[in-house]
Image (cartoon, rainbow, N blue to C red):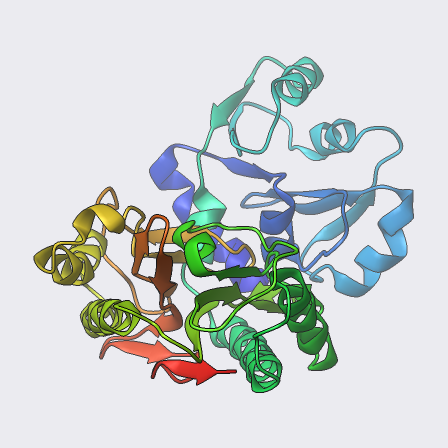
């Protein structure tokens, strides 16, 4: 945690800032270790303070890094944060995506005129995009819990079970394997319902000869995993296998393109070109992938609008899909760690088409 504060301090001069106020709770956790629901942090060259209320004083004593002075707010957290600032003129950065207009007005009223409030964008998120070995280990454990849950649930077959039943079973099995919860509400979408990329499980029974898109993940120590597999239930499948092989070819091409220094947009294009060449470009309407960590969607992004290069330590998904309205959908997704050599895949579930009862 101390190293993270030092790295944040290293970014401040380039942004014209003297100090940073961190209020987004995931960023507070990243910077200090605090997992509660009410806290903020101040980071500056001579000031490193964490503020919470009475409810979390003991929790903060156990969790917050010792490099931070731990302060209990008598009133609002922002009042105490304002009091903890050093005297004199300074430019105080704040997280403009996390601080409401009301909170900004409140903070402005608490500060002397020589303190300038500066919208600082996503400085902490920039740090979070590069995972350290401890973070990667947590995500590896999350992926393992999710993978074993999937193998257990699909081993029982899918035909005759509802989408909701399968989704609930996945959640339960992940908890049984050490997860604190799911990364998100699992997607289980059979047949035509699978053509909706973010379908919600229904009280509809899965039948034979259906492609079933299953998108799920687990949380371990606050860090998420994310995986998608498309399973075929035994029966007549039409052109489903051909579409599956197309998506798999695109996914493998995307994985091959992932490495430190690769342009994020070019990685997306590598996979997208495979699908477009087969005439299904219009049926792949989302980005190739996204960063994962303390949040299920974070930097960096892999899409046609993405900017910048991948860096060693990024953790990203690679998840192309083809969605045929009224018929079925196919998506294949792996969670990967970006290295100088390429992509280390954290997912262990086979990508061969799984056919189950």
x 42%, y 54%: residue? 192
58 relative to 283 in the view: left or right? right
Taking the view exactly as shown, the residue that stands out farthest to the left is 277
Quadrant of residue 148 in the image?
bottom right
Query: In this rendering, is residue 285 above or below 209?
Result: above
Q: Nearer the viewer, residue 331 or 143?
A: 331
x 39%, y 71%: residue? 334
x 24%, y 75%: residue? 340
* Residue 197 percent coordinates (x, y): 42, 51
Quadrant of residue 30 in the image?
bottom right
Q: Nearer the viewer, residue 209 or 296?
A: 209
* Residue 179 percent coordinates (x, y): 68, 73
x 49%, y 64%: residue? 215
350 relative to 183 in the view: left or right? left
Q: Nearer the viewer, residue 347 or 337?
A: 347
Quadrant of residue 219 in the image?
bottom right
């Amino acid at each position: 945690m101390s190293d993270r504060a030092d790295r944040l301090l290293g970014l401040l001069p380039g942004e014209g800032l003297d100090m940073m106020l961190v209020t987004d709770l995931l960023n507070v956790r990243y910077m200090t270790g605090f997992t509660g629901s009410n806290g903020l942090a101040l980071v500056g060259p001579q000031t490193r303070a964490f503020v919470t209320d009475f409810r979390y004083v003991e929790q903060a004593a156990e969790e917050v890094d010792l490099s931070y002075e731990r302060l209990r707010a008598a009133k609002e957290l922002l009042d105490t944060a304002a009091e903890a600032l050093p005297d004199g003129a300074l430019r105080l950065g704040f997280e403009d995506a996390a601080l409401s207009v009301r909170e900004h007005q409140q903070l402005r009223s608490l500060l002397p005129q020589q303190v300038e409030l500066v919208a600082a964008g996503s400085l902490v998120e920039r740090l979070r995009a590069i995972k350290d070995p401890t973070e990667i280990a947590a995500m590896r454990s999350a992926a393992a819990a999710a993978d074993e849950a999937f193998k257990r649930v699909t081993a029982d077959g899918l035909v005759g079970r509802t989408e909701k039943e399968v989704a609930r079973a996945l959640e339960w099995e992940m908890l049984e394997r050490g997860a604190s919860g799911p990364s998100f509400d699992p997607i289980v979408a059979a047949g035509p319902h699978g053509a909706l990329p973010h379908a919600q499980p229904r009280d509809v029974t899965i039948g034979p000869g259906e492609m079933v898109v299953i998108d799920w993940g687990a949380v371990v120590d606050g860090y998420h995993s994310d995986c998608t597999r498309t399973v075929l239930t035994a029966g007549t499948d039409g052109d489903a296998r051909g579409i599956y092989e197309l998506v798999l070819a695109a996914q493998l091409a995307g994985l091959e393109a992932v490495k430190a220094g690769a342009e994020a947009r070019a990685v997306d294009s590598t996979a997208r070109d495979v699908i477009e060449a087969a005439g299904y470009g219009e049926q792949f309407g989302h980005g190739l992938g996204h960063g994962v960590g303390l949040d299920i969607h974070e930097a960096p992004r892999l899409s046609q609008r993405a900017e910048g290069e991948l860096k060693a330590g990024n953790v990203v998904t690679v998840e192309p899909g083809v969605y045929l309205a009224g018929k079925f959908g196919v998506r294949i997704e792996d969670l990967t760690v970006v290295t100088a050599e390429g992509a280390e895949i954290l997912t262990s579930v086979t990508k061969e088409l799984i056919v189950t009862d």
